[in-house]
Amino acid sequence: MTPFFRFRPIPVATLSLALALTTGLTACSSTPRAPAAQPMAQDASNQPPVKADGPKRAKLHTELASLYYSEGNMAVALDELRQALDADSNYASAYNMKGLVHLYLGETGDAESSFQRALSLAGNDPEINNNYGYFLCQTGRVRQSLQYFLTAIKNPLYPTPERAYLNAGQCAARMGDDALALQYVERSLRLSPNNPTAMFELANLRLKRGEATQARQLLMDMNRLQDPGPQTLWLGVRIERALGDRSAELSYATQLRRRFPDAPETQEMLKGNGR
């Protein structure tokens, strides 16, 4: 199973601005501007501090938490989220991000309460629905997860429905409904034709359906976009084995053994599985 799509990374430029704003808040508060009609600057000590309002600060700290989450620094991410919720205790995106952090840490109870709080504040938010669907699928409630992916997909303001389609496809495959999984993954790939993860999922589903030639083409397209990892190479071994191309199978197998000797996929291959 390839990784799910969970949240959209914050663009570097946005995060750089966020960092600049964070470090600049104190400076702004100590450098008040004189009124336009006042020819002489007033004593700075008499000016009230300039401070961003609660929702803006909550958004800022949540974006920083997203950055630290993507870097694997969960302790700092949680601290940023604490500050976000101190600034605005009803900021749904902070609870959404908090749910992802707790899920990463294996704290499923805290993760669920965070996601549910986010949904209570913004029940139609597509990102929150997508992430809660991911959480449900990861914690064994696969069928229940689909309704949240579909809620995200139906939102006309959701800029990346292909992510929710792909997650829905992966979860449908996990519950054994390959026909439904195929439908969702194909929709995802139509919306994002160069997504290697969707290509991998579709190739895997095609192989399971006995459509090895189509699976091979998808794998070739994917390998043109990125270097193959162990999952991709193992899929290549199985596709070429199904097609009876011993030379191509051996090529994939050699790469897998040489480049990823300790990968679970390599161990599966050496055990003779996947036949």
Image: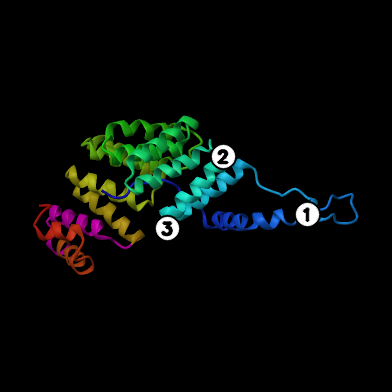
Closer to us: 32 or 227: 32
Give how far apart the Cα atoms at labels 2 and 3 are.
25 Å
- Residue 132, image quadrant: top left
Compared with 25, 138 (above or below) is: above
Identify which residue is drawn at 48% across, 50% down.
79
Q: Mark 3 points at which residue?
A: 71
Mark 3 falls on what kind of element? loop
State the image coordinates of residue 46 (x, y, percent, origin top left): 80, 51
Q: Earlier in the sequence, mark 2 or mark 3?
A: 3
What range is drawn magenta here?
227-248
Mark 2 falls on what kind of element? loop
Left or right: 236 with respect to 94?
A: left
Q: Tell me which amino acid carries mark 1.
A: Ser
Q: Name the residue under label 1.
A: 45
Identify which residue is drawn at 42% across, 38% down.
114
The dot on residue 56 is none
Give how far apart the Cα atoms at labels 3 and 1 are.
40 Å
